Image (cartoon, helix red, strand yellow):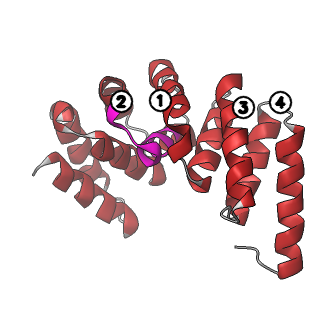
Amino acid sequence: FSPQNLSNLVWSFATLRMGHDRFLEAAAVEAIRRIKEFDAQGLSMMASTFSSMGMLHRGLFECIATAAVKLISTFNARDLESIAYSFAAIGFDAPELFDAITAQALQKIRTFNSLDLANLAWALAKLRRRHDALMEEVASRAMHLIGQDSFPSQALANLAWALEAMGTFHSALLERISHEVVRKLERQDLQ
């Protein structure tokens, strides 16, 4: 199996909600053995899959974190938010990884869509990793995207929760979120 094939296979099992602990353990061991062969997408997919299944394999998450830091400049917005969200959802804080993620996110913030922004903010808040400069950029980008009518309701909720959880009071963004929620309610557009 190539690393991509292994990631795809593990993802397929997660999609089918097939736990099979023996299979997942074998897949984790193989991923650890070949971690240097994974690209950004493969690393984020592997973390996402294990996280979504609720399986915290510490050795695997440590290897993913180390490999991701080395490849962080190759991560796109989706990969950055996905790996951050996966680590936060499973409750595994990797300080070096999150430092690298925040640095890259600051550089690539203009490429983030609404879900990327909301999930990244949620992940940082969940792990109590406050980063004021990044949150200011997230707020600016979010206000722009809300104005383009490209923020789903769940993303608005996650972003508002993250702001509150981090103690970040950004009145302009909260006002924009409030207006957008009212607009969605009036249109009965709760997607």
Mark toward the start of the polypeptide (1 vs 2): 2
Are discs 1 and 2 less than 8 Å apart at CB? yes
Drawn side of residue 138 relative to residue 108, left or right? right
Report the mark closest to the observer, 4 or 3. 3
Report the mark closest to the observer, 4 or 2. 2
In the rendered structure, which segment of residues is drawn in magenta?
Answer: 73-84
Q: CA distance from mark 3 to mark 2?
A: 21 Å
Q: CA distance from mark 4 to mark 2?
A: 29 Å
Asked which secondary structure carries label 4, the reply is loop
Amino acid type assigned to the residue bearing label 3 in the image:
Glu
Q: CA distance from mark 4 to mark 3?
A: 13 Å
Are discs 3 and 2 less than 8 Å apart at CB? no
- Specify the quadrant of the image occupied by residue 56: top left
Asked which secondary structure carries label 3, the reply is helix
Q: Which numbered marker is on residue 73?
A: 2
Q: Which numbered marker is on residue 167?
A: 4
Amino acid type assigned to the residue bearing label 4 in the image:
Gly
**Is residue 81 highlighted in magenta?**
yes
Please say whether residue 129 is visible from this viewpoint. Answer: no
Query: Neighbour class for label 4 at 10 Å: few (<14), some, many (≥20)?
Result: few
